[in-house]
Amino acid sequence: MKLQSAKREAHMVVLHEYSGAVQATLADLEKRGAVEKVWARDPSLWTADADHQRIIRQSLGWLTVTAAMRDRLSEITGFADEVRRSGFTHVLLLGMGGSSLCPEVLRLTFGSAEGFPALHVLDTTDPATIRAVEQAIVLPHTLIVVASKSGTTPEVNALQQYFLAKLKPGRGQRAGAQCIAITDPGTPLEATARAHEFRRIFFNPADIGGRYSALSYFGLVPAALMGIDLFELLERSQRMVHSCRAGVAYKWNPGLWLGAVMGSLALQGRNKVSIVCSKEIAAFASWVEQLIAESTGKEGKGIVPIEGEPLGTPSRYGSDRLFIHLRLEGTRDVAIDGKLKRLAHAGHPLLTLSLHDRYDLGAEFVRWEFATSIAGAIIGVNPFDQPNVQESKENTKQLLDDYKATGRLPAGEPIFSDDEVQLYGDEATRSAIQGCRKFSTAVKAHLARARAGDYVALTAFLERSPETEKSLSVIREAVRDQFKVATTLGFGPRFLHSTGQLHKGGGDDGMVVQFTADDHQDLPIPGEAHSFGIMKRAQALGDFQSFQRRQRRALSVHLGGNVRAGLRRLQDGLTRE
């Protein structure tokens, strides 16, 4: 079976016994007038609840943002030219989730064109990472982009306070001239930008949610500052918009079709979507991860995106996977192609979507936004809210308020200690690891509670260094191979604005292993009683409290002062014992 979308290459589709379910879903969507309702902005496609319908009506601006942004190209590119003429050599974007992921994807996929500033994206409260980025830029020649839809994102506010304070000794009251803001109209960030006389404020359309904002100012302003051809990116996007419009036959609508596959297979038990990309566009998967996880993971339901997990042999997987391969034409994905063919031959459904070149990512942003909205309608959730993201923010705020009053965060009592490493969990977790003598054995005992169809989320409130990422990747692969479960890997607090919604709002098919460690050197947040290190600890603790309140299977691993040694011990325990 093949899918042919308008003016695009044929895409290989292997659905096996699920083909009938997809066709039935497409027929049902057509009977419901799904595409027509999307474009009419009719919230009844997703829900009959009046409160949710109000949210949805205010969240569909992404459908027409491509055309709106094409009308503003001269404004955006003109500003990018102004920045170049002003002698800026670096751009530092401060953002979280939907405000930072698209710029990060574009940075890693395209890089900066010759003569344009280098882009750095900072979306963390980890002191070591903040310090490393600060050392990588030349601050007097750096334009700072403060990006937040709500203008109240705690991490972004803290980073903004930090870098504004760093600018003031050299620029005094004119420090704001090195900053711009991207936000909705009327937010606290707008007020801050005006008070500090920021160089520019870009007001994003208010009817676009963060994770659907890739083709708005949030994605396009950083893209222009890097010298990416916005006209070409939006031209590809607009072609996909037309292919997904009402009037296109349902079976040839590429966004609808992809959504129908994801939604119908999720209902059939294949709710783990493994996203595999050609290496040149590999960063795109992290954007898709947030889009799917935060849109569908709620009300005890969810489609679980699997990004960055190495491909294995068919015997390593259960029957809960859908594999989607985004393949860049002209690349040699021989190893990937071979592994995916073996997986398809073994009965796993597989889609291969072809991209002509990197600029086709513009089309993919649109396709996946449309598909995710359709998948949400199929599984019965509102894909445009994120109720449990706010819960984590409130937990963190309460902990930081307590810290301000007492000067400390609640430590709790470990359920297991092994040299520097301490483990935390509830009574069920304590019972599961009872009798273990090494912490790696205790982690394995915790993971042994996994059931068929579960996934394991590794959440790391650690510095995101190449060495740490490599160790966690090895651990991740060992977990998948031994327990036959899907795995995700997220660095905190970044994942709180991405898969964090799914972890808490989705079904009880997720297990968590959280990693924390001592910071060797902290950084203050100007004007606050707490530091970045304290903020990061509060975020980790607040997230873990959410799991415990839900009685989810969660284990927190505190590695002490030697992250490298602790991860190595766990890696060895999982791969050799």
Image (cartoon, rainbow, N blue to C red):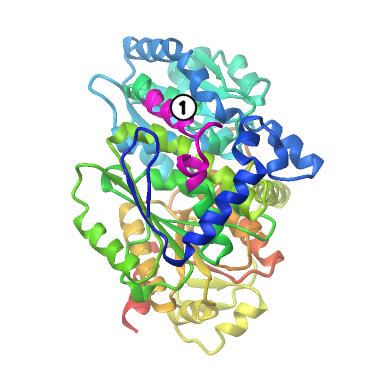
**The image quarter in which residue 344 lies:** bottom left
**The image quarter in which residue 161 lies:** top right
**Magenta segment, principal secondary structure?**
helix
301 and 426: which is toward the camera: 301
The residue at the point 52 percent across, 56 percent down is 22
The relative height of residue 86 versus residue 527 in the rendered view (above or below) is above
Residue 7 place in picture, x, y as percent: 35, 32
- The residue under label 1 is 166
**Residue count near mark 1 (Cα–Cα under 10 Å), binned few <14, some 14–19, many ≥20:** some
234 is within the stretch colored magenta: yes
For residue 361, side relative to residue 52 (left or right): left
Q: Secondary structure at mark 1?
A: helix
The relative height of residue 488 versus residue 219 in the rendered view (above or below) is below
For residue 454, side relative to residue 93 (left or right): right
157 and 287: which is toward the camera: 287
The residue at the point 48 percent across, 30 percent down is 241
- Magenta span of residues: 233-257
Residue 265 place in picture, x, y as percent: 52, 60
Q: Report whether residue 96 is seen.
A: no
26 and 534: which is toward the camera: 26
Q: Report whether residue 203 is seen.
A: yes
Residue 60 place in picture, x, y as percent: 62, 32
267 and 393: which is toward the camera: 267
The relative height of residue 17 versus residue 360 in the rendered view (above or below) is below
